[in-house]
Amino acid sequence: MQTEFEFMLPKGYLDAEGNVHRKGVMRLSTAMDEISPLRDPRVKSNPAYATVIILSRVITKLGALEDVTPRVVEGFFACDLDFLQTFYRQINELDEPTAHTPKQPEQSSVNEAS
């Protein structure tokens, strides 16, 4: 059974040093990944923040970053966040298959740290 899935962000995460991180790995979600954020005070005051915490738990690799923290996820461009939400639902089989699936973007030559 496959539990980890590679992805390529459409734009990529831009870190403080100007490096762009696009290639990553997301693992399947567990029940605890969905339940744990509900105890977080940031989620209690803003339920949409659960997405940030869940993604930081299930993205196991992103470029050359050591960790994907909620702070990193907060810095994603909107198109990358949308891509990851769709990808998450797809690999965890939470949606019916549709014609709209995330596309893997073309490689770019922008200072990427893989």
Image (tube, rainbow, N blue to C red):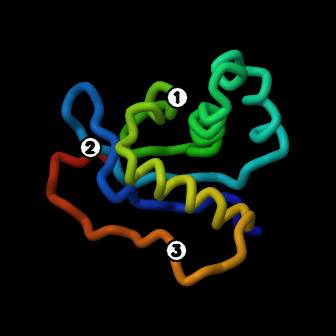
Is residue 90 or residue 95 the one in the foreground? 95
Q: Is label 1 in contact with label 3 (beta carbons under 8 Å)? A: no
Question: What is the residue that sits farthest to the bottom in this orientation?
Answer: 99
Q: Where's the N terminus, which quadrant?
A: bottom right
The CA span between labels 3 and 2 is: 23 Å
Which residue sits at x=47%, y=25%?
71
Q: Name the side, left or right, on which 43 lies relative to 25.
A: right
Question: What is the residue that sits farthest to the top in this orientation?
Answer: 41
**Relative image position of residue 4 (x, y in whole percent):** 63, 58
- Give neighbour class at mark 3: few <14, some 14-19, many 20+ (Cα, 10 Å): few
Provide the residue designation for mark 3: 101
**Element marked by disc 1:** loop
**Element marked by disc 2:** strand
Give residue 69's mark.
1
User: In the displayed structure, would residue 85 be above or below residue 13?
Assistant: below
Compare marks 1 and 2 and give the one earlier in the sequence.
2
Q: Name the side, left or right, on which 38 lies relative to 107.
A: right
User: In the displayed structure, would residue 16 be above or below residue 64?
Assistant: above
- Give neighbour class at mark 1: few <14, some 14-19, many 20+ (Cα, 10 Å): some
Which residue sits at x=38%, y=56%?
9
- Give neighbour class at mark 2: few <14, some 14-19, many 20+ (Cα, 10 Å): many
**Element marked by disc 3:** loop
Provide the residue designation for mark 2: 20
Which residue sits at x=26%, y=25%?
16
The CA span between labels 1 and 3 is: 26 Å
Q: Name the side, left or right, on which 30 lies relative to 21.
A: right
Type of the residue with mark 3 = Thr
**Relative image position of residue 32 (x, y in whole percent):** 82, 38
Q: Nearer the viewer, mark 3 or mark 2?
A: 3
User: In the displayed structure, would residue 91 be above or below residue 77?
Assistant: below
Compare marks 3 and 2 and give the one earlier in the sequence.
2
